[in-house]
Image (cartoon, grey):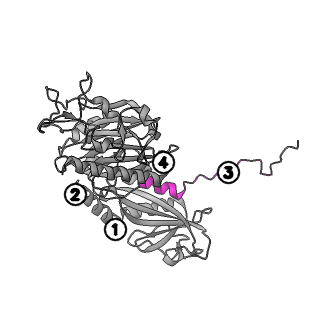
Amino acid sequence: MLTFLFWNLNGKNLISSIAKLVVNHNVDILILAECNLELTPANLLRTLNPEEQKAQFHYVPDKYNHIQIFTSFRKSWVMPVAEDNKHYIMRTITLPGRDEVLLVAAHLLSQLHAKEDTLYAEAIKFAEKIRHTEIALGHSRTIVVGDLNMNPFSNGVVASSGLHGVMTQAIARKKQRKFQEVTYPYFYNPMWRYFGESADSPSGTYYYDKSGQVCYFWNIFDQVLVRPDLLNQWDDESLQILTSDGQQSFLTPKGLPDTKNFSDHLPLLFKLNL
Amino acid sequence: MTKMESLWPEEDFDVPKITAPIVILRQQAYALGQKTRNILEAEVSSHPFYMKPPRKLSPGQSVLSNIQPISMLGAIESKEEDIIQSIDEPPNALQHSFYITAPVLGGYRYRLFTVSHQPISIYPLSISFDGKTSGVNEEEGFRSALRDIFASESTKKVVQALLAQSLSETAS
């Protein structure tokens, strides 16, 4: 079982919370976006690998160090497959005796810097790159995780030429859909379930109440999407939007992200049965 | 049905208690990661190649550059051109390259030294480090040579430089 944690840190030095989360949840793959200048890969390695203990975590080299990936297993099991991009990196993960998995970690263009149609166009390019990489690898055991800066219902995430993320496994297991003579593979997007009121979970991963006429307040920009070929390994019940590091809450008393002390994004935790 | 006859000797094979050079090198690669908390790591890459038969040297004739002499008795000497793979000759030896890697610096790799040996008769093996090649005749001599390489000024310089740059590397 591999445990993944993704967190957009919004430039905050949350090294202590990261360390707690990694220990509390036995995280194997830590993926971070928007790390600040103090949160260098080397500083994180020193935190994840405390003195007097076995140094377990490795940094996965990346051309830009924009998205930082750390693994608790040897780095030779994680290999680059495509040229690194400022907004996403792709790595294969091959554990001994297991099928190779394609991990795509993303931090796509911000809504602050691009309009919806630009995000859509970029999402199409991103999805195309994933499909091309899958063809080159000869399989589509792919998982995408990150801050997509779009909601699960945004065109870039839903469109067939985009990520083609659907809200149920039943649909995703049909594997693909043909539109205008072109066949597009599905992703299962489990994040849909987090919209609205829920007793044990916040209503999204990111809160924003300053948009115009149309305002969702809660957004789910931080997402994980799973290809049908990986669904048998996907642990649906493990998916959580985390609201505390075990000691401190990431939320204010009103239940909104505590942006003063923590990130404006909440972290995602999930497991793959590999 | 006729019972198949085994022509192998009845006694068990007496497996010699040695640690293969590749294992020793991998242990040392792991040890560097532990020492630097994986800010620097090391890896060993192996490939077969053709090596001209080593020439015997008289005792004391060969030393690794700027490190203390290793086991001198029966040391061998070979030149760089001896260990370059020949396209005309089939591989008859293994070469292990020991790299120091800096994951934080985009995975930069620095080849610190290489070890070459015949696949069956492991010793004597040759070590190329800092532009010079020398040999060792047994496992303890190999460990001693590695100790010398890791303690040498030129290794320290490489490790210090890569550590300093890794620690100053920030997220973009």
Whether residue A111 is visible, yes or no, is yes
- Amino acid on which disc 3 is placed: Asp
Residue nearer the viewer, B23 or A246: A246
According to the image, label 2 marks what residue?
B168
Chain to which mark 2 belongs = B
Dot 3: chain letter: B
Q: Which residue is mark 1?
A: B154
Question: Is residue B47 a member of the stretch shown in magenta?
Answer: no
Q: Please tell me which residue lies in front, A31 or B66.
A: A31
Secondary structure state at the residue bearing disc 1: helix
Above/below status of A44 relative to B162: above
**Label 2's element?**
helix
Of badges 1 and 4, the one in the foreground is 4
Q: Amino acid at mark 1?
A: Ser
- Tell me residue B18's x, y (percent): 57, 54
Mark 3–mark 4 CB contact (< 8 Å): no
SS for dot 4: loop
Q: Which residue is mark 4?
A: A139
In front: label 2 or label 1? 2
Q: Which residues are magenta?
A: B6-29
Confirm whether circles 2 and 1 share one chain: yes
Across and down, in percent, residue A119 comes to 25, 49
* Front-most of residues A155 and A75: A155
Residue on which the image places disc 3? B14
Measuring from the top left, give residue A12's x and y in whole percent.
17, 43
Sequence order check, earlier mark of 3 and 1: 3
